[in-house]
């Protein structure tokens, strides 16, 4: 299984038109051009990858790549 | 907390407009949709409105509207469920059902209300909405209001859609939501494939045909005719204010669902009914489409091809449209407004789309040439594009 960071970066590349390097501090909207549906697509991919369910409340306030990784870490640690 | 602080929260961010030195939104239109229109005192060629068949200012529609006003006045001042349901409303909704080939129809004051109000009636937390990621805001906000799981699929990507449908099996009901003609791109949905996938997985298709009705299909009846779909068992919505040149929105489908919406859709039940002059206009335009669609459609497609060919020749990046929409890929929001300004300065009215209407750095400038335009007017518009940097 991929690490969380690898999985997030793969999901970002699969679901956006961004083809450059992805850095942790990059903002989803302004720097990577990801809208709210783009975020949902990334989350849905991660649900599939880790076999978990992520609620709408869980994805509120995600601003950067690091935010997604941190939130996923929290969810996976609760589910562990 | 005081009211001054409250109102300070609502400052519009005009930074983009300041940078572009130009605001293309809310232009003040001072004429009907003629060959040349008047915008803030200046003459413009209209490539912005959705007046595909060029009938919005047709004398026959205006006369029909006048007669309805004579009989019913401007409004029945009531919701349809109360006393806003006229014999004209009843007749037009059945006429629209026949036009698109579905069992039953209900009319909303706008298609935004129709789309926005549909899902909180038919879907809930135990359902999943699998929705094309380029869908219109009315559909997106509609599914959000239902509180269901939202699973966007890549634009017109059937493999990705099927992945969502496989996941959907653990939900009570899956809805597959899409548009016939995508309003910012001009792309067209492979609806036969979507209906087949829905059948395979027990999902319900929901299609918004706002830019298809009166435009595509052999006789202008929209996506179901275009895709030759018989016995459609899903839900169909469309705007009555684009090719049909009036106002309002329709939801059509099986009798059971329409009867349910009549009593449980708050966007319908609590909205003042669509006005009589619009209903009469819709009645009139359906008759005109029956007689004149081939000729008007031919003109519209001819103009569309001329515009598209010219823009490609001039090295504009144009979206891969197969419909009567031509869409320039205009870059980030600032680049989009700057190009729009150049086009406006040449006396051509177009529609710029920036985030959130499109993805963040993927602006579009949409051009639609209605069949009411004359060839010399269109030639003038094309010449303006050729000289845009002079």
Image: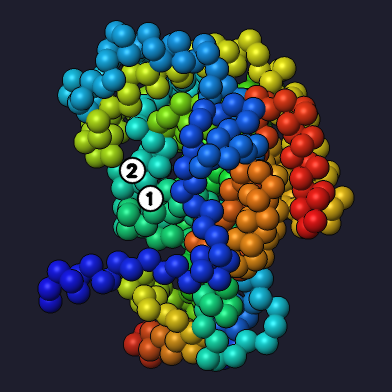
- Kindly indicate whether the residue at mark 1 contacts the one at mark 2 (C-beta within 8 angstroms): yes
- Count of labels in the image: 2
Q: Which subunit holds the residue at mark 2?
A: B
Q: Furthest residue to the front? A: B41
Residue B42 versus residue B377 in the image, above or below: below
Q: Return the x and y of residue B259 as percentages of the image width and height.
A: 30, 27
Residue that label 1 marks: B142
Determine whether, in the image, residue B221 is placed left or right of residue B93. Answer: right
Tell me if residue B65 can be seen. yes
Q: Which subunit holds the residue at mark 1?
A: B
Residue that label 2 marks: B117
**Number of other residues with Cα within 10 Å of mark 1, as a class: few under 14, some 14 to 19, many 20 or more:** many
Q: Residue at x 58, y 40 (%)?
A: B42
Q: Quadrant of the N terminus of chain B?
A: bottom left
**Number of other residues with Cα within 10 Å of mark 2, as a class: few under 14, some 14 to 19, many 20 or more:** many
Q: Return the x and y of residue A30 as percentages of the image width and height.
A: 53, 77
Tell me if residue A40 can be seen. no
Residue B311 versus residue B238 in the image, above or below: below
């Amino acid at each position: 299984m991929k690490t969380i960071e690898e999985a997030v970066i793969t999901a970002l590349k699969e679901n956006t038109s961004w083809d450059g390097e992805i850095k942790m501090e990059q903002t989803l909207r302004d720097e990577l051009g990801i809208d709210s549906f783009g975020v949902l697509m990334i989350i849905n991919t991660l649900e599939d990858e880790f076999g978990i369910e992520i609620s709408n409340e869980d994805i509120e306030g995600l601003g950067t790549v690091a935010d997604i990784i941190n939130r996923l870490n929290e969810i996976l640690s609760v589910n562990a | 907390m005081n009211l001054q602080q409250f109102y300070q929260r609502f400052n519009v961010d005009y930074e983009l407009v300041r940078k572009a030195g130009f605001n293309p939104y809310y232009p003040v239109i001072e004429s009907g949709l003629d060959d040349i229109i008047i915008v803030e005192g200046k003459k413009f060629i209209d490539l912005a409105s959705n007046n595909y068949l060029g009938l919005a200012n047709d004398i026959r529609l205006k006369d029909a509207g006048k007669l309805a006003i004579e009989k019913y006045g401007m409004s029945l001042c009531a919701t349809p469920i109360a006393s806003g349901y006229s014999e004209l409303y009843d007749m037009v909704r059945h006429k629209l059902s026949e036009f698109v080939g579905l069992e039953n129809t209900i009319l909303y004051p706008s298609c935004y209300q129709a789309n926005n109000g549909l899902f909180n009636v038919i879907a809930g937390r135990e359902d999943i909405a699998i929705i094309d990621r380029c869908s219109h805001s009315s559909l997106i906000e509609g599914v959000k209001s239902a509180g269901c799981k939202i699973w966007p699929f890549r634009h017109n990507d059937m493999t990705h859609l099927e992945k969502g449908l496989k996941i959907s099996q653990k939900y009570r009901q899956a809805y597959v939501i899409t548009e016939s003609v995508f309003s910012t791109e001009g792309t067209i949905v492979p609806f036969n494939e979507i209906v087949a996938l829905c059948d395979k997985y027990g999902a319900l298709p929901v299609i918004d045909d706002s830019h298809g009705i009166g435009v595509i299909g052999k006789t202008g009846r929209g996506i179901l005719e275009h895709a030759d779909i018989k016995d459609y068992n899903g839900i169909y919505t469309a705007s009555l204010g684009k090719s049909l040149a009036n106002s309002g929105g329709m939801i059509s489908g099986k009798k059971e669902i329409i009867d349910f919406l009549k009593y449980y859709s708050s966007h319908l039940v609590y909205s003042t009914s669509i006005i009589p002059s619009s209903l009469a206009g819709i009645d009139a335009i359906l008759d005109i489409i029956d007689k004149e669609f081939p000729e008007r459609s031919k003109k519209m497609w001819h103009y569309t091809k001329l515009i598209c060919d010219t823009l490609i020749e001039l090295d504009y990046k144009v979206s891969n449209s197969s419909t009567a929409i031509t869409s320039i890929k205009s870059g980030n929001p600032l680049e989009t407004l700057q190009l729009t300004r150049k086009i406006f300065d040449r006396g051509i009215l177009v529609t710029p789309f920036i985030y959130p209407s499109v993805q963040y750095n993927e602006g579009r400038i949409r051009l639609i040439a209605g069949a009411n335009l004359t060839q010399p007017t269109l030639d003038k518009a094309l010449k303006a594009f050729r000289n845009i940097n002079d």
